[in-house]
Amino acid sequence: MCIAIPGRVVEIDHPFAIVDFKGTRRKVRIDLLDDLNVGDWVLVHVGFAIQRVDEEEARKTVELLEQIFGGI
C-alpha cells in the first residue's frame, strides 16, 4: 500500500520545496508538478510532490489518516 501525505508549500527553491506537514517541515522534490506556488497544498510520496490538491481535500485526507493511524 502506498500512502501520500498532504502538506502545504511554504518555500520554493526549484527543484525543491519546503512543505509543512502539521508543523513538521520537509524538503521535497517538485519536478513532477508545474506552476507550483507557495501556499499550494500537495500530496507527497517518498519525498516527491506528486499531486496538487485543494485545501479542503488535504484536510479531509489528514483527518482520515489520523483516524486510521492515530495521528500523523
Image (cartoon, rainbow, N blue to C red):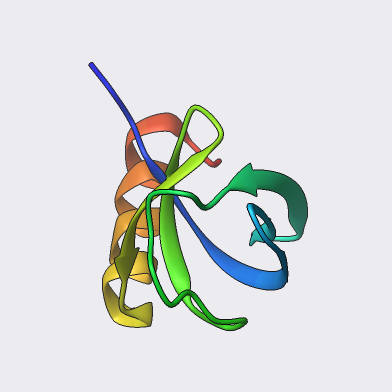
Image point 76% across, 51% down: which residue?
24
Q: Does residue 6 sit above or below 47 in this rendering?
A: below
Image point 37% across, 39% down: which residue?
4
Apparent side of residue 25 relative to residue 48 in the rendered image (left or right): right
Q: Position of residue 25 (x, y in %)?
A: 76, 53
Image point 52% across, 53% down: which residue?
30
Q: Does residue 15 sit above or below 40 in this rendering?
A: above
Q: Position of residue 69 (x, y in %)?
A: 42, 31
**Towards the viewer: 11 or 41:** 11
Image point 45% across, 71% down: which residue?
41
Image quadrant containing the N terminus: top left
Apparent side of residue 2 relative to residue 62 in the rendered image (left or right): left
How many numbered marks does the figure carry?
0
**Towards the viewer: 6 or 35:** 35
Apparent side of residue 33 relative to residue 25 in the rendered image (left or right): left
**Towards the viewer: 71 or 39:** 39
Residue furthest top in the image: 1
Image quadrant containing the C terminus: top right
Q: Does residue 30 sit above or below 39 in this rendering?
A: above
Q: Position of residue 51 (x, y in %)?
A: 31, 56
Identify the image quadrant of residue 33. bottom left
